[in-house]
Image (cartoon, grey):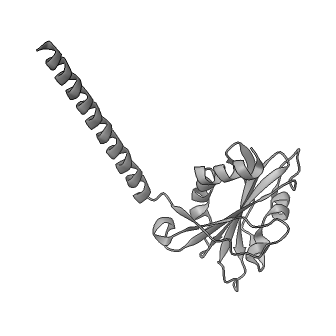
Amino acid sequence: MKGRSLFALVVVAFGLGGSIATLGWLASGYKKEAVRSSGQSTWTEVAWPFAPDEWGKGKAFRCNASNCGTEIIYLYIRAKLGFCNCETGIADDADLDRMGDLHLVGGKTSALGAGRPITVGHMLGRSRAYTLSARNPLGRSAITAAFNDRCDMIVATVVLPHDRPDAIEREAIEFLNGKTVMRWAEVTLGL
């Protein structure tokens, strides 16, 4: 009889442990969904829309209106190997303007103010907001960000259909710090 009691106790213990683990798993899924619905953006990879140049293709992402506000936003990233100043990185706005990819989105641009330092993973860099010319079919404003690891850098360009780049800059930098971009950076830059 003792053997059966011990066996029954073990079965109940495993069943209770499994139930607790299942409840924990369900609760963690619920929390993730709650965070997403509270305003955290979701970026989906799309095809690189630009013609190849000396830096090659990069990655393109889209944030739908339901996740990033009232309109669709695009973010483009690509690596520029050996292009960055190995000692100073992206030291100031002149470096950012020279190294950025605003030429991809075309038209005239005008800086909306001074840039600011950013951190993406272990890499330091800068970001700066710009207005795009009124005739630009891709958007009304843009954010350029560049960050480096030694002599190699990654450039990001966010194109917005409105003239409020400050409204999305934090979310874009968070996305750049996320698993998707950080894994790509590790492979691309050989980190």
Relative vertical location of residue 156 with respect to residue 134 in this rendering, above or below:
above
What residue lies at 77% left-to-right and 76% top-to-bottom? 51
> Which quarter shows the C terminus?
top right
Give the answer, above or below, for where 130 lies relative to 3: below
Say if residue 90 shows up in the picture. Answer: no
Residue 6: image quadrant is top left
Q: At which x and y percent is residue 145?
A: 72, 59
Q: Position of residue 84 (x, y in %)?
A: 86, 53
Q: Residue furthest left?
A: 1
Picture residue at 67% right of the left edge, 83% below the top:
137
Residue 109 location, x and y as percent?
A: 76, 75
Residue 110 sits in which quadrant? bottom right
Q: Is residue 29 left or right of residue 40?
A: left
Using the rendered view, name the quadrant where residue 129 is placed.
bottom right
Taking the spot 79% from the left edge, 66% from the top edge, the residue there is 56
Which residue is painted at 71% across and 50% down in the image? 187
